[in-house]
Image (spheres, rainbow, N blue to C red):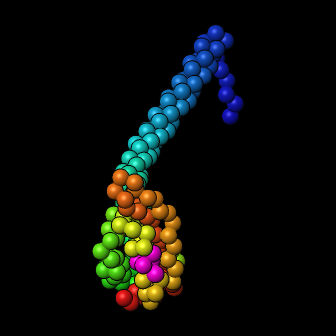
Amino acid sequence: MIKINLLPQELQAVQKRQRMKSCVQKIIFLLVVLLIIVSLLLWVQTKRIKQEAGLIAEQRANWEEEIAFYETAISLDRQAKHKKNILQQAIGSSFDWAQFMQGILASAAEGIRLTKLVASREDKQVLVNIEGVADHYTDLSQWVLLLKSTSGISEVHVISTKKLESLKQVQFTVRIITGDGKPYEP
């Protein structure tokens, strides 16, 4: 069957325009609906990502606190181990400081007065610097000889002496070195 259009050309053109307009309106409507759906999906996804970012930021803050705590704990642990090693080295040697110092004080004759004692430990040797005042040079020399003859003391050095004119006494500095860190035996 053949379609015959008996409408005038002008009416046909108007109908054609209306059909075209209707088709364009439907396409625009579909595009707007599609844009609304896409924007809603993007909005939902953005909201979900923001929530995840908030949770991640919260977890990061918690982890940073834990890291700071562990860093402090690790630092304190290292310090404790270092001090423990030093203490074990000090205890591991059988050097009796109290007995050693008491022996030095007891060996000082009546004419010797000690004013300052500084002791330190280097490797396996104990160094003691002693400052004091002696009534005479002979008192000082007798005391130094006594110290040199004491077991456990390897060296005794008179570092300095100075005659005090006003008191007619001798100010001195003596250094005592023990051998191999062996225990002092008076």
Residue 79: tell me if it is visible: no
Residue 146 within the segment the image draws in magenta: no
Residue 144 within the segment the image draws in magenta: yes
Point out residue 65 in the picture as x, y percentages from the top left corner: 36, 55
Where 113 falls versus 63 (above or below)? below
Task: Please provide the residue range marked out in magenta.
Answer: 141-145
Residue occupying image coordinates x 32% and y 71%: 111
Residue occupying image coordinates x 39% and y 73%: 139
Residue 44 located left or right of residue 12: left
In which quadrant is the C terminus drawn? bottom left
Point out residue 35 in the picture as x, y percentages from the top left corner: 50, 33
Foreground of the two, 90 or 185: 185
Picture quadrant of residue 110: bottom left
Residue 154 located left or right of residue 184: right
What is the chief secondary structure element of the magenta stretch?
Answer: helix
Residue occupying image coordinates x 30% and y 80%: 106
Point out residue 125 in the picture as x, y percentages from the top left corner: 50, 79
Point out residue 175 in the picture as x, y percentages from the top left corner: 48, 71
Picture quadrant of residue 119: bottom left
Residue 61: tell me if it is visible: yes
Residue occupying image coordinates x 38% and y 90%: 185
Foreground of the two, 99 or 82: 99
